[in-house]
Amino acid sequence: MTFDKRMLLAGFSSFSCGFLLGSTHAGRLASLRFRAENAHRLPISQPGWYLYHKSKNYYKMKAGISEGMRKGVWLATWASIFFIIEESLDVFRGTWRAGRTLEEMEGVDELDFRDMNKSVDKSRDCLSSAVAGMVTGGLWSAWNMFPMVTAARTIRMGVLVGLGYGLTQDAMTWVRGRSVGYVDEAESWVYRGAKNRRREMPHNDA
C-alpha cells in the first residue's frame, strides 16, 4: 500500500481501537461511580428504577464518549508518528542507495527519479519498521519521563513490535509473489512526484 493509504488506514484503525478501549473502560468506571454516588437514594418504584437506569446510561455514555475520543486521538497520533518515522527511514535509505551522500551533500533534486523510486521501494523491509518501533518507544519513554529501566524495556518492546510488524509486511509481500519492497510505480508517491516535477520543469527549446 502507498504511504497515504497506509496513514489513512492506520489512523482510522488506531482511532477505532483507542475509542473502543477508552469508551469501554471509562463507561464502566462511570457506571460504578454513579451507583456509588446514588447508593443512599435508590428508587423504590418501577418508574423510579426506569429513570435511575436511564440517568445511569446517560452518565455512562457521556463519560465513555469523551474519554473514547481522547484515547482515540491519542493513539492515532502515536500510530501516525510510527508510520511517519518508518516512511522517513525508507526514503532516507532509498535516497542513500540512489547516490545521495553526506560528503558531496547531493540532494534529492540531483538524483535520477526512476532510480530513486526503485531504491526507496527496495528499502521497504522489516529493518525500517524495527528502527521506527525503537524510535517511537524512545519518544514515548521521553514523553512520559520513564526511568532508565522502564525506558529500556519500552524501547525493547518497540523494537520487537516493529520487527514483528515489518516481518508480517514482508511475509504478505512474499505470499503475493512480489519482491520485498515492491510498490507499483503508478501508485508510488515518489514516482508521481517525479513525474509532476519533470512536467513543471521548463523545457529548453534551443
Image (spheres, grey):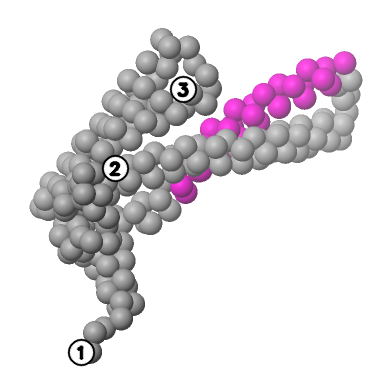
Name the residue: 31% across, 77% down.
201
Q: Which residues are magenta?
A: 11-40
The answer to whether the residue labelled 3 contacts the one labelled 2, judged by CB atoms less than 8 Å apart, is no
- Dominant SS in magenta: helix
Let me know if residue 32 is in the magenta part.
yes
**Tag 2, which secondary structure?**
helix
Distance of mark 1 from mark 3, alpha carbons?
59 Å
Q: Amino acid at mark 1?
A: Ala
Q: What label sits on residue 206 in the rendered view?
A: 1
Label 2 crowd bin: few (<14), some (14–19), many (20+), radius 10 Å: many
Q: Amino acid at mark 2?
A: Leu
The answer to whether the residue labelled 1 contacts the one labelled 3, judged by CB atoms less than 8 Å apart, is no
Numbered marks: total: 3
Quarter of the figure that contains the N terminus: bottom left
Which tag, 1 or 2, sits closer to the chain's start? 2
Name the residue: 89% across, 20% down.
41
The answer to whether the residue labelled 1 contacts the one labelled 2, judged by CB atoms less than 8 Å apart, is no
Image height of 31 relative to 18, above or below: above
Q: Nearer the viewer, residue 128 or 56?
A: 128
Q: Nearer the viewer, residue 103 or 36?
A: 103
**Tag 1, which secondary structure?**
loop
Q: What label sits on residue 89 in the rendered view?
A: 2
Q: Can you give x and y, in whole percent of width and height, for residue 74 in the image?
A: 55, 37
Label 3 crowd bin: few (<14), some (14–19), many (20+), radius 10 Å: some
- Seen in the image, is 12 located left or right of residue 165? right
Let me know if residue 34 is in the magenta part.
yes
| Residue that label 3 marks | 141
Q: Is residue 176 visible?
A: no
